[in-house]
Image: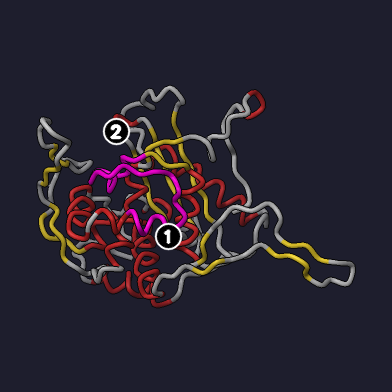
Amino acid sequence: GRYFYKNRYARYSDFNRATGSLRQSGSAWKPLVYLAAFRQGLKLDTTVPDEPIAVAMGAARPLKWIANYDNEFKGPIPMRQALAESRNTVAVWITREIGLDRVIGTSRELGIRTPLQPYITTALGASEVRLLELAGAYRAMASGILAEPYIIDRVTDASGEVLYEAARTALEFSSSHLTLIQEGLRGVVRIPKGTAHSLYGRDFPIPVMGKTGTTSDFRDALFVGSTYGPHGVTVAVRIGFDDNRTLGDKETGGRAALPIFREIMLRAYQEKLVGSVPSFPRAIEEGIDQYLVHQPGQSR
């Protein structure tokens, strides 16, 4: 993406919240956990436990029991479902299984430069991160290209010869691992119980992948999403106050941030501010189709 909106009062403030503000990302961080897991051999159909799990919070402090947003546990479920429904317990279990160092390592390869806390709750977005870096990580997952910000795209001489062009660095990830996270995040939109399923319908004809995020006490609401491939567009939205007060009860990423993402994407493509809408590979869409066929009560 080439544009960012730094805050609602940009005329009166030089502080850029897209590049300078450090905030928790909540469940919008989970895709980085899942990609790290795919690199360790887990798959979208790998069965994982959605069950009570406790984490240590430091010396002389009691264990913290991790809850899901709906305060329910579904037992053994496939990773695809766990990602689509944003099951907190599964993200923590995965991180414990593969090691937090692998999650942090994957995030670094995706362009996250912010220092991250060495605690397992980082799996749930408890570490603070810059929104621009998080957007870059999603861009990288959608395109396979490391998304580093730049000002000058290219320089040419009078004859049209290119004298300089901004570098596009390919990620050193297996294409099969990127395909898994792309299909998983597309499922967040397409699977009926996915947290971003409202983006799948006739009133939003743009195929996207993405993830919601909500921090404790509804202080931050996020949605980060992207169209597919190197010519796609990535948009990251965060709603929150500088003084860290709550947005209000139930002001989740799906409720507060996702509608803004929707309107930005519609305008960008309908008004031709960007190129044509890219489609996801057929194999990704068919993988989700096959999952839905075998789910009672779910439809395409």
Which quadrant of the view contains residue 15?
A: top right
Q: Residue at x 11, y 60 (%)?
A: 76
Q: Secondary structure at mark 2?
A: helix
Q: Which mark is residue 109?
A: 1
- From the top left corner, tell me how far across and down residue 253 is, in percent: 38, 41
Q: Residue at x 23, y 41 (%)?
A: 69
- Magenta stretch in the rendered image: 104-127
Inspect the image, locate mark 2, and give the three-letter code of the amino acid beneath it.
Answer: Ser
Label 2: which residue? 216
Measure how far apart labels 1 and 2 are at the Cα level: 27 Å
Q: Residues within 10 Å of mark 2 (few under 14, many from 20)?
A: few
Q: Nearer the viewer, residue 22 or 283?
A: 22
Inspect the image, locate mark 1, and give the three-letter code of the amino acid beneath it.
Answer: Glu
Which quadrant of the view contains residue 300?
A: bottom left
- From the top left corner, tell me how far across and down residue 57 is, in percent: 17, 36
| Vertical side of 27 occupied by 12: above or below | above
Q: Nearer the viewer, residue 77 or 38?
A: 38
Which quadrant of the view contains residue 124?
A: top left
| Vertical side of 192 occupied by 174: above or below | below
In the displayed structure image, the side of residue 278 where residue 199 appears, left or right: left
Q: Residue at x 27, y 63 (%)?
A: 37
